[in-house]
Image (cartoon, rainbow, N blue to C red):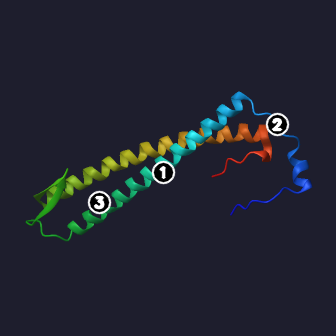
Amino acid sequence: MLSKRMLSREEEAQIGEEKEVRREDQEKINRFSRLHSREKGLDEQLKAREKEKEDLEEISTELELADEDEKVPYRIGDSFFSLPVSEVQGLLSSSVEKIDTNVGSLEAKLGELRDEMQELKTALYGRFGRSINLEA
């Protein structure tokens, strides 16, 4: 956990004199901040999709125990329709496939975003050293 404290003389000496923040540095800092915010949003979307996929797989497992002739309610939009178990299982598997595709694209976006953030971190830490904190 981070705590606020004064720097010791040794830490001050390690940091050295303060460096002037140039326009390009500020643009990198702002870009990092925007990417970090976007990363949080994509992380939340990814977790929601994975939870949704897990729920659908659990429902599909439960339906395997149901009688084939039985009709079960299936939600399409805001309405529920009574459909045969086999049809619902097909719809569930196609929904899981769509979610898998969506999760894959979200993970790819997150990977690109994190790569760019790492490049910015490297550049900014190289310029400012310990006088800047980019850890969330």
Q: Which residue is mark 2?
A: 19
Image coords of residue 58 (percent x, y): 30, 65
Foreground mark, 2 or 1? 2
Q: Amino acid at mark 2?
A: Lys
Q: Is residue 75 left or right of residue 57?
A: left
Q: Is residue 10 left or right of residue 32?
A: right
Q: Nearer the viewer, residue 18 or 49?
A: 18
Mark 3: few/some/many CA within 10 Å (<14, 14-19, 20+): some
Foreground mark, 3 or 2? 2
Instruction: Identify the element where label 3 is drawn.
Output: helix
- Residue drawn at x 73%, y 62% is 3
Q: Amino acid at mark 3?
A: Leu
Task: Name the image quarter holding residue 88.
Answer: bottom left
- Residue drawn at x 39%, y 55% is 48
- Residue drawn at x 18%, y 52% is 78
Q: Earlier in the sequence, mark 1 or mark 3?
A: 1
Q: Which residue is mark 3?
A: 56
Rendered position, 102 above or below 66: above
Image coords of residue 19 (percent x, y): 82, 36
Q: Amino acid at mark 1?
A: Asp
Instruction: For marks 2 and 1, give the CA distance.
Output: 34 Å
